[in-house]
Image (tube, grey):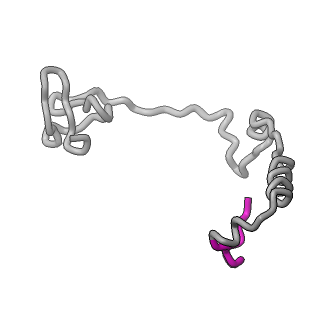
Amino acid sequence: MATDYDTPRKTDDEAGEDSIEELKARRNDKGGAIVDVDEADLAESLELPGADLSNEELSVQVIPKRADEFTCSRCFLVHHRSQLAKEDGNTYICTECA
């Protein structure tokens, strides 16, 4: 819903002056503006220009963890040993998560 920030705001005294009928009418107006949209149909109809990647294969080279690296037990990222903040048995925590 768009908000017009230039309109004067009501004070607490003026807000209490709204009649019950006005408040009911506002509530009914807001309830009638709801639109049910099927998200699946919307996603299928979107087509980005130049983005036909249906025949493309992505290939990523996976490099195994080296001896001087560890996997943080909180963020699950592989870091160099210089970023090790805490070690408790097999639990390693990096400096960013500590």
Q: In the figure, is residue 90 to the left or right of 75?
A: left
Where does the image place residue 26, in percent across and percent down from the top left?
Answer: 82, 57
**Image point (83%, 44%), residue name:** 35
Q: Which quadrant would residue 91 be assigned to in this image?
A: top left
Q: Nearer the viewer, residue 31 or 54?
A: 31
Q: Nearer the viewer, residue 58 or 96?
A: 96
Viewport quadrant of the C terminus: top left
Check the image and name the residue furthest to the top: 89
Q: Nearer the viewer, residue 53 or 10?
A: 10
Q: Is residue 70 magenta?
A: no
Viewport quadrant of the N terminus: bottom right
**Image point (62%, 35%), residue name:** 56
User: What is the total number of numbered labels drawn onto the structure image?
Assistant: 0
Q: Is residue 20 above or below residue 95?
A: below
Q: Is residue 43 above or below residue 65?
A: below
Q: Which residues are magenta?
A: 1-11
Is the magenta region chiefly helix, strand or loop? loop
Q: Nearer the viewer, residue 84 or 10?
A: 10
Where does the image place residue 36, in percent across and percent down from the top left?
Answer: 82, 40
**Image point (25%, 41%), residue name:** 97
Q: Which quadrant would residue 66 be assigned to in this image?
A: top left
Q: In the figure, is residue 2 to the left or right of 89?
A: right
Q: Which quadrant would residue 47 be assigned to in this image?
A: top right
Where does the image place residue 29, in percent across and percent down from the top left?
Answer: 85, 54
**Image point (68%, 46%), residue name:** 51
Where does the image place residue 95, in percent across and percent down from the top left?
Answer: 19, 43
